[in-house]
Image: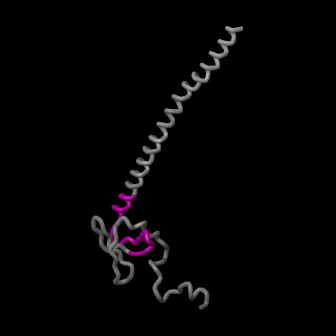
Amino acid sequence: MLNYGNEVASLVQTTPLQTASSGSGMSTMLILALPVLLIVWMFWSNSKRHKAMRAFSSSLSIGDDIITNAGIYGTIRHLDEHSAWVEVAEGTTLRIDRRAIAMKQPDAAGTSRAPGPDAAGPADATGQ
């Protein structure tokens, strides 16, 4: 009986160690690989976004109707490497950074830029 007790005790002591050592290698690789993959994906998506922004900025030309990040509508009157002069009203031109241009205005059939002061606004639509 003494031998049987020693064999059971040795099995109990070796079995958990063997399973832990075989599984710990894979979990260690996952713990190390996932952050590396996340960092690689972040750099890749960031460079992709920067390429798209550079392509958009280089596609701008004089006369384009644009909308800025602040929501200002205007027409590009002059461009240089870093700035754009945008006419927001007749005789009013703003110099803005090219990176502040969010998008080109979508072409609306039969409509011009912004309605003038004599156009029907929200106050006229309610009858006031």
**Residue drawn at 34 percent across, 76 percent down:** 94
Inspect the magenta stretch and tell me whether residue 69 lies in it. Answer: yes
Check the picture and name the quadrant holding the N terminus: top right
Inspect the magenta stretch and tell me whether residue 58 lies in it. Answer: yes
Q: Residue furthest left?
A: 80
Rendered position, 6 above or below 46? above
Left or right, residue 32 beside residue 83: right
Which quadrant of the view contains residue 51? Answer: bottom left
User: Start and end of the magenta stretch?
Assistant: 53-74
**Residue drawn at 58 percent across, 23 percent down:** 17
Q: Position of residue 125 (x, y in %)?
A: 59, 86
Q: Position of residue 93 (x, y in %)?
A: 34, 79
Left or right, residue 93 beside residue 41: left
Q: Residue furthest right?
A: 1
Q: Nearer the viewer, residue 46 or 6?
A: 6
Which quadrant of the view contains residue 84? Answer: bottom left
Q: Position of residue 81 (x, y in %)?
A: 28, 64
**Residue drawn at 41 percent across, 48 percent down:** 43
| Colour scheme in use | one colour
Rendered position, 90 above or below 75? below
Rendered position, 108 above or below 35? below
Q: Residue furthest front?
A: 2
**Residue drawn at 43 percent across, 75 percent down:** 73
Q: Nearer the viewer, residue 29 or 121?
A: 29
Q: Residue furthest bottom?
A: 128
Check the picture and name the quadrant holding the C terminus: bottom right
| Number of numbered discs overlaid on the protein picture | 0
